[in-house]
Image (cartoon, coloured by chain):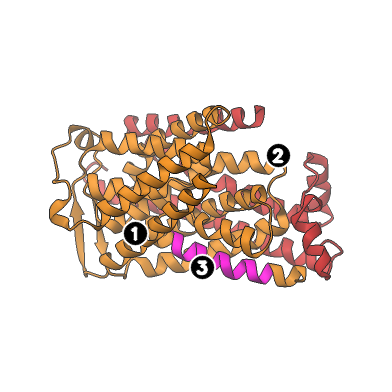
Amino acid sequence: MTSHPKRKVARTEDTISRVLRTGVNASLVLLAAGTLLSFLGTGYGGRSSDVARLTGAGGSFPRTFSWFVAGLLHLDGQAVIVAGLLLLIATPVARVAVSMAAFSVERNRTYVAITALVLLLLLLSFALGMAA
Amino acid sequence: MTPFGFTVVVLVISYAAGLLGSLVGVGGGIIVVPALTLLMGVGIQKAIAASIISVIATSSGAAASYVSEGITNMRLGMVLEVATVAGALTGAWLAADVPGRGLYLIFATVLAYTVWSMLRPPAHRAVPAPDAMADRLRLHGSFFDRSLGKEVSYRVSRTKLGLSVSYVAGVASGLLGIGGGVLKVPVMNVAMGMPIKACTATSNFMIGVTAATSAAVYLMRGEVLPFIAAPVAVGVLLGARTGARLMGGMRNQAIRYIFVAVLGVSALQMLLKGLR
């Protein structure tokens, strides 16, 4: 394949572009569906006092795994939105991981090392952020 | 205002933020934060959390198009990401010990200087210099510029300066919660010698990664409110998609001017925060 370096690069770009597009579309669907479910259910309400509640402390969600799983199973709007947000946040990280894989297929050691370093620093800063 | 009205207004504002952010390679926080706090009465902490979500949405929403159109310089993006993520780590580390006001004033000054350097005529810009690092990492690039109707190729200079500025941009995002795009675009354009479209697309590519970890931390801490974040993310994603479709066909000079305007507004916002 060394005779077609351009084609190889184009393929990597298509893969990365597809990862981004898939992540974005899936989170768009989840965020829109979650918002719709919240309006249809009892989550959001229709009075102006509800806005103050939802943008204040009352708008926060229970951050436990069991709430999240149960919420998804019951199609709770807030849990579906959180799933969309998690997917949105995971998309750029997945993009780095997929680039690393693409570079290793190309046997491009320098760039495998560079993307691995980015991933490592991302994990480190996430761990430090959670500890703080 | 009812929750439905709130959602619709936030959607529209976020669409505009995503459109603007994707054109010039910044996260759209300069629109989202003031709109949420001043217009919608949201607390500053929750607004910043929403704006970090909007940085990721701008980045991913537009990057898919820029990458497949070939405008993004992915290699350079990944090289600079190392510096910018390391900087964000440092910034988060320092955050407790550094007085915010002085920092805002320093940044206002830096951004004002950047406005000046971006507005100087091309003759005053740094001349391309041989750069062994750029050669070794194969950072030079080319893309098809739809507005010019031809392939544009460029050589990247001063990679080390680019790495240093990206590190500082990372520190700034860790300390002040700003996206680093306002610093990365000028250094790529003015010092590294890249065409403005390649700069904004590459900056756009990078900012999502820097924001991802802080967004995850904000989400786990409960600062991200689904009621606000959902319409922000949806609006910004759609706006960024529109912006990415438009950018390739726009005149380079127009993108430059829009970026300088964004830069000027950011400088003012920083100055106000520093003086308060």
What residue is drawn where x is 19% and y is 51%?
Answer: B154
Count of residue discs:
3
Find residue B17 and report its horizontal and vertical position in percent: 51, 63
- Judging by the rendered image, the residue that carries numbered circle 3 is B16
| Nearer the observer, B84 or A80 | B84
Q: Is residue B134 left or right of residue B199?
A: left
Query: Which quadrant of the structure image shows residue A76?
Result: bottom right
Q: CA distance from mark 3 to mark 2?
A: 28 Å
Dot in front, 1 or 2: 1
Q: For residue A68, say whether it is visible.
A: yes
Measured in 3D between alpha carbons, the distance from the residue under mark 1 to the one under mark 3, in whole angstroms, is 17 Å
- Work out which residue is located at the far right of the displayed protein and give it: A42
Measured from the top left, where is residue B12 in percent x and y? 59, 70
Chain A's colour is red
Image x and y of residue B27, in percent: 48, 54
Give the residue type at disc 1.
Answer: Val
- Going by the image, does B66 lie left or right of A34? left
Q: Chain of mark 2?
A: B
Q: Secondary structure at mark 2?
A: helix
Q: Amino acid at mark 3?
A: Ala
- Mark 1: secondary structure: helix
Q: Quadrant of the image for the C terminus of chain A?
A: top right
Q: Are marks 3 and 2 in contact (CB under 8 Å)?
A: no
Question: Which residue is label 2 attached to?
Answer: B221
Q: Which amino acid type is marked by label 2?
A: Arg
Labels 1 and 3: the sequence-earlier one: 3
**Which labelled disc corresponds to residue B260?**
1
Q: Residue furthest front?
A: B275
